[in-house]
Amino acid sequence: MTRALLLLLLALTGPALAAPAVVTLSDGRNILLIAPAAPAKAVVVMFPGADGSIGIEPDGSIARPNNFLIRTSELWLARGLYFVAVDAAPGFVRSNGNRVGPAAQQAVTETIQAIRARTLAPIWLLGTSAGAPAALAGAVSQPPGSIRGVAISSPVYTSPRRDGVYDVDLKRVRGPVLIQIHRDDACAFTAPSNAPELKAALTAAGPVDILTYSGGDRPRSGPCEARAQHGFFGIEATVVNAAADWILSH
């Protein structure tokens, strides 16, 4: 579909959908799309951590909503951002490349198609923890101009499943990239001291900025899980608003 035809269809059918929508992709995974109350300023496509499985149901409910990017959906919507959550494919095998391989990249392509049927707002890929490599790999897999940029948080640098940020061809990532870290993140796979090296590896991207946070609530989960400094527990609004400000200014 050409951009001109899409503009005409959007003009005829009105603004982006106000009610949540669930779309099933070709590999069986569901994505959840929620439009803000006003026309979207941008789209944020969320790749949660761990194995990426959050359990999006056909009615739009989420079985496992604790991930930082997922539990903060209302904060993103309040900033005028179109919220899209990407689930894992059903029955997937946890293996090397699950988050960055061809199947994951095809899911990004189909997700963008679903978004473009609803809004022409600029698309950003966001990933936290093991979802950070997924967002970066998704950016690499798309043709120029398909997405505006990438914002990642608590990125996994090394992984026994080869799904870390260095399993992505980082020199092919273009456009703005935001890296958000918590200085007290105690997860062994996401050491905040590695952020400058990651920034340096993004040689074709720009601007690339690192935002560092501190504080929050006492952890209620393990150090690599969502309700600890790794997941910005207790400072969610600060981190989301800083990311939204950065996204909307780029």
Image (spheres, rainbow, N blue to C red):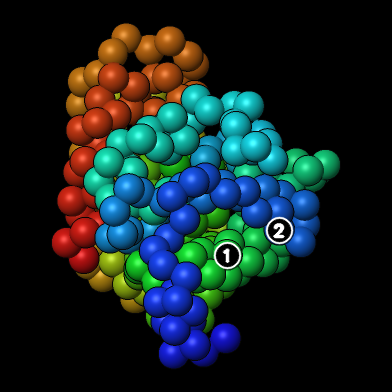
Which residue is outermost to the front?
A: 12
Residue in view at x 40 percent, y 72 percent: 120
In the picture of the structure, the residue carrying the numbered disc 1 is 114
Task: Name the spot of residue 170 as percent of width and height, x first.
Answer: 45, 67
Q: How many marks?
A: 2
Q: Mark 1 is on which residue type?
A: Ala
The residue closer to the viewer here, 135 or 237, is: 237
Task: Name the spot of residue 72 as percent of width and height, x first.
Answer: 38, 33
Q: Secondary structure at mark 2?
A: loop
Question: Is residue 106 among what the camera can see?
Answer: yes
Give the crowd class for mark 2: few <14, some 14-19, many >=20 residues within 10 Å: some
Q: Tell me which numbered mark, 1 or 2, is placed earlier along the sequence.
A: 2
The residue closer to the viewer here, 140 or 157, is: 140
Whether residue 6 is situated above or below residue 21 in the rendered picture: below
Residue in view at x 39 percent, y 20 percent: 228
Residue in view at x 44 percent, y 90 percent: 4
Whether residue 161 is situated above or below residue 119 in the rendered picture: above
